[in-house]
Image (tube, grey):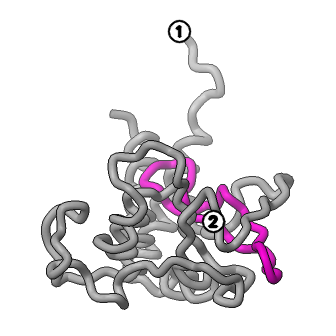
Amino acid sequence: MNASKNARERAGRLGFEIWLSVLPHSPDVSGVPHRREPGSRPADEFRLTQVTDTAALRPRDLLLALHRERAYSTDNRTIMSAYTAREAVRARESAVCLVTSVNATHVMIHQGINIPLGGWGSCDPAMFGQPWRQNIPPLRLHIPSTTRTVARLGSLDTFLPAVHEHPDYPAWCSAYAEAERQQNKQPAHPER
């Protein structure tokens, strides 16, 4: 395995571990989340709560917007009732959205944001929580939604300090910088 790939994998892994560590999770729950019986499910403070009113939301909130019509192995009701917030994000990591504005009936969201997903493409520490592309306008999401189950994860302004204060944050930044250096060393079109 080459140095560039090792550096990218390390940066992606560190970012993902840090991101998951700042999400609510209970060490008291065990077993496979979708098989938990009602008595062994996480306490309310560790689970997600469905958002049914825009009054509960603010700009810069992070949402987990779970599609209802897609065929997933675990349905949204189970995720909302049996998973901790950390487990829910891990199960549906690409469903995390950033709220840009709120009105009485809907929110505007950036559906694709930079949060570490375990790989190289989304793990830039300087871009955490920012839209993937600034030139793509936000999407309208009605609350309550007929197509998605929506839950508030928290404010990006709360997550950012927690990420920056994590003891492994400097290692993540270093790993990312090293991965970029390694990436820039490689020729654009390797000779065959």
Can residue 171 be seen in the rendering of this structure? yes
**Dot 1, crowdedness within 10 Å: few (<14), some or many (≥20)?**
few
Query: Callout 1, which amino acid?
Result: Arg
In this rendering, position of residue 122 left or right of residue 4: right
Which quadrant of the view contains residue 92?
bottom left
In this rendering, position of residue 83 left or right of residue 49: left
x, y percentage for residue 36?
18, 68
Residue 192's disc number: 1
- The local secondary structure at tag 1 comes to loop
Instruction: Give the magenta part as a residue range.
Output: 95-122
x, y percentage for residue 56?
64, 88
**Dot 2, crowdedness within 10 Å: few (<14), some or many (≥20)?**
many
Residue with the mark numbered 2:
97
Residue 138's disc number: none
x, y percentage for residue 154?
55, 83
- The local secondary structure at tag 2 comes to strand
